[in-house]
Image (cartoon, rainbow, N blue to C red):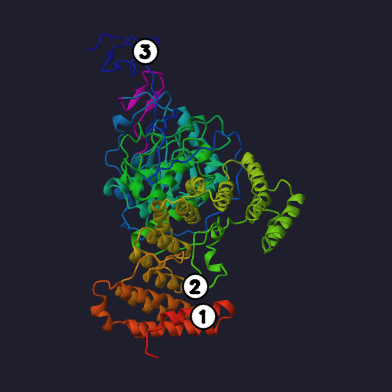
Amino acid sequence: MSSERCSQPGCTGMIDEGYCDACGHAAVKRGTSSLGSSASRGSAISSVSSRSSITTGTGSSPRSRAATGSRRTRHSTRSSTRRQLGAGLVTLPELPTTDPEKAVLLNPQVPEGKRFCASCNHALKRETGFCGKCGQRYSFVPTLQPGDLIAGQYQMKGALAYGGLGWIYLAFDNVLSRYVVLKGLLNVHDESSAAAAVAERKFLAAVKHPNIVGIYNFVQHGAEGFIVMEYVGGKTIKQIRQERGPLPIGEALAYVHRVLPAFSYLHQLGMVYCDFKPDNLMLEKDDVKLIDLGGVRRIDDMGGDIYGTAGYSAPEAGEGPTVESDLFTLGRTLAVLVTSISGFSKEHRYTLPSPQEEPLFAQQESLYRLLLKATAEKAGDRFESADDMAEQMLGVLREVVAKETGTPRPAQSSNFGGDLLGFEMAGELQPVRADASLLPIPAIDADDKNFAEIMNAEMVPDAEKKVGALQQVLNRNPKSREVRLRLAAALGRAGKYDDAESLLASVENEDAWDWRVLWYRGVMLLSRQNATEATKLFDQVYFDLPGEVAPKLALAVAAELAGNHDLATHMYDLVSRTDSNFVSAPFGLSRCFCTKGDRKSAVAALDRIPQSSAIYVRSRVEAARILVGIGASNRRIATPEVADLEAASTVCESLVLQGASRHILHQEVLVSALDCLQAKKPGTVRSSRAKKILGSVLEETQVRQQLESSLRALARMSNGAERIRLVEQANQLRPRTLF
């Protein structure tokens, strides 16, 4: 036995194994302190941050705008309308139906490692007693026993689990014939927890959302109060993660995406959840529910306790939870579901591993960027709202599923219009080049009071007149951000870059997080042949909107024009696999493969364009040209093989081209065939007589005859010098004869 006396006033007991043998108080340890948080003790969060700089798989790093001095202003919030788990994109495992009473604990105890003083966070050994550091009385013993009847209505079945604020019990409602959950206090002598429970009774009964556990009642039993909640069967996502290890990305995204509307609902009510983690999300049948509302508080409550869990809580959460700190916990939860992060609550408490440390992040760039934004060190650099995060998360989910299944998952964006290439008024034979003017246009905020006037001005085809129309709208509404951005874009297209930049700078000074400033700047830089700097801006927009297709397309175009064909190839491929409506991407991917001399892959890229596309014929023409060795710049890049000529002939014969277009394309194929024969490539002469190109045997005389015929047909459709040139060319290429 220790010779140390109990330090409690008036007590004569001795300390035995750290506790007084008379009064039960723990020994007071002088000069020690305890900080941190735990999943079960709901302790206050410290605000220490040790975030390190990390870059993505492409070598880029998001920039923080939180230190610019500008004030972030929220854009219009779009509520999510998709209610189906996973938006119908993934098939999730079903859980078997279980008897609720089988979940009751046979011997409910709080493990010693989970016992902490709610007042000072000091570790506690005994189940009951007094904290040796601050003297707070505590008890971790369940107060309700099976068979107890609560409030004359709820028949107690037993304890289910323990949480941050108390024991959770299963009971049967004898009046309404249903199972319910009663949540009491883990430490029945903790005044702080008692106050939190009262707060739940006051405002949580108003919370009604299909993905949030329902609050039915608040009852008194002796000196204790209990919250009566909806019983939710199934398993927590934490249990699923423990049983199966890291979850498939699509499944994890579906779970977290589904609960985001519940967070949006709470935030709109002026509440924050505070302590979200996998323990608090329950999978029941084919849906998920947010459970354990013990840490929920009002955003404007500056005096309440702050609860959180190390590794999940934001660096600044100790100063007061916010919408942004809630989003941080959602991002951390998603990271835990898909990876095994070493040092999650220590060296990586506020950071994510780099793609070099975690291969999954290198493979799934958009997922990694989503997580980086959700868990950014500075709150202002995170998503603006749960709805914004949900929208981007759904975009990432579409991309992940498209990559895994090989089937594009197109969707309409609320931030951008569609690919403009399909609306370009160009001929069937016009090559498709990288062009900033064909990039998608950011959507106009429909809630802006100037929406109708902006739309009318945007319909003006002439660039100068469009600038004038938008300037008139701005004169009437000088503070409208939407009008300034649209006018800046029009000025940029008209070549008035300084005036455009002045307007963009004014918007940036008001809100440095408005990604549209970077977008329009990037477009102007491309117009000014500065693709390298444009690449950096579009890369940041990709960080801001990781689930959008348009920033990836813009990044690909800028990278291609900057000569970074590896990055361009990667981004074009990602876009085309995700959304088949973005037809610019297959053309860009094809150009990149041509640059690398990979003719087969270049043609395969164009095969991704669906027949329903308005640009389909141009894709087939481009494929035929690549097969015969002609690049997008109309320059011959290689002499084709016989198989290439046959494939090009098949493509040409499948097209319905009118007038000169048909003869021009046939001429290009026949010229390449003639070059191939004259080059006497290995195997060409031996096998040519068995091959046919555009209906003629692959033999020099017949190819020349057909080429001559095509040129003369073109000449008949032409006039003046062009007609003379074509006739002379036909004379030069016709087969030699005696007459």
Q: Amino acid at mark 1?
A: Ala
Q: Which residues are magenta?
A: 125-144
- In percent of width and height, residue 200 lies at 51, 39
- Considering depth in this image, is 107 or 627 the residue closer to the camera? 627
Name the residue that disc number 3 marks: 30
- In percent of width and height, residue 477 lies at 74, 49
Q: Please, what is the dominant secondary structure of the magenta stretch?
A: loop
Q: Amino acid at mark 2?
A: Leu
For label 1, count other residues whose C-alpha is less than 10 Å away and answer few (under 14), some (14-19) or many (20+). some
Q: Earlier in the sequence, mark 2 or mark 3?
A: 3
- Considering depth in this image, is 468 or 739 the residue closer to the camera? 739
Name the residue that disc number 2 marks: 429
Name the residue that disc number 1 marks: 660
Figure quadrant of residue 688 = bottom left
Q: Quadrant of the C terminus?
A: bottom left
Q: Secondary structure at mark 2?
A: loop
Residue 623, visible in the rendered structure: yes
What whole-number distance in Å separates the C-alpha atoms at marks 2 and 1? 10 Å
The answer to whether residue 177 is left or right of residue 502 is left
Q: Earlier in the sequence, mark 3 or mark 1?
A: 3
Residue 10 versus residue 283 in the image, above or below: above
Q: Amino acid at mark 3?
A: Arg
- In percent of width and height, residue 349 lies at 38, 34
- Considering depth in this image, is 225 or 168 the residue closer to the camera? 168
Residue 292, visible in the rendered structure: no
Residue 298 versus residue 704 in the image, above or below: above
Figure quadrant of residue 631 = bottom left
Residue 402 in the magenta stretch? The answer is no
